[in-house]
Amino acid sequence: GLAPLGDNLFQETTASGPANVGVPGDPGFATIQQGYLEASNVDPVKEITELISAQRAYEMNSKVIQAADDMASVVSKNIR
């Protein structure tokens, strides 16, 4: 990858290699078309479904941690 220099500046590294410089339309480079819109490649229904699933998993993990804290509290009270 690129090495950060600070102030939003980056420097090429051996891992990134030199920059590829070219002209739009040359072989290996895309063309720029004025007045066109880029379509999104994200499926919003799938993303919301995955977000809800991740949120539920987070809530369950939070409840497990809370239950463990409660059990530790009960144990520490009974030891005293």
Image (cartoon, grey):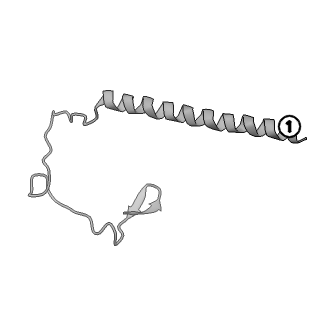
78 on left or right of 31: right
**Quick one: which residue is furthest to the right in this view?**
80
2 on left or right of 26: right
Element type at mark 1: helix
Residue, x 74% and y 36% (percent of image)? Answer: 71
- Amino acid beneath label 1: Lys
52 on left or right of 67: left
Residue, x 50% and y 30% (percent of image)? Answer: 56
12, above or below 79, in the image:
below
Query: Residue 44 location in percent, x, y?
Result: 31, 29
Residue, x 21% and y 34% (percent of image)? Answer: 39
Judging depth in this view, the residue of 14 and 59 nearest the camera is 59
Query: Residue 47 location in percent, x, y?
Result: 35, 32
Query: Residue 10 location in percent, x, y?
Result: 40, 61
Q: Which residue bears the numbered disc 1?
A: 77
Judging depth in this view, the residue of 8 and 55 nearest the camera is 55
Crowdedness near tag 1: few (<14), some (14–19) or many (≥20) residues, C-alpha within 10 Å = few
Q: Quadrant of residue 43?
A: top left
**Quick one: which residue is furthest to the bottom in this view?**
14
38, above or below 18, in the image:
above
4 on left or right of 28: right
57, above or below 10, in the image:
above
Query: Residue 80 location in percent, x, y?
Result: 91, 41
Instruction: Tell me the quarter of the image containing the N terminus.
Output: bottom left
Residue, x 62% and y 32% (percent of image)? Answer: 63
Image mark count: 1
Q: Quadrant of residue 52?
A: top left
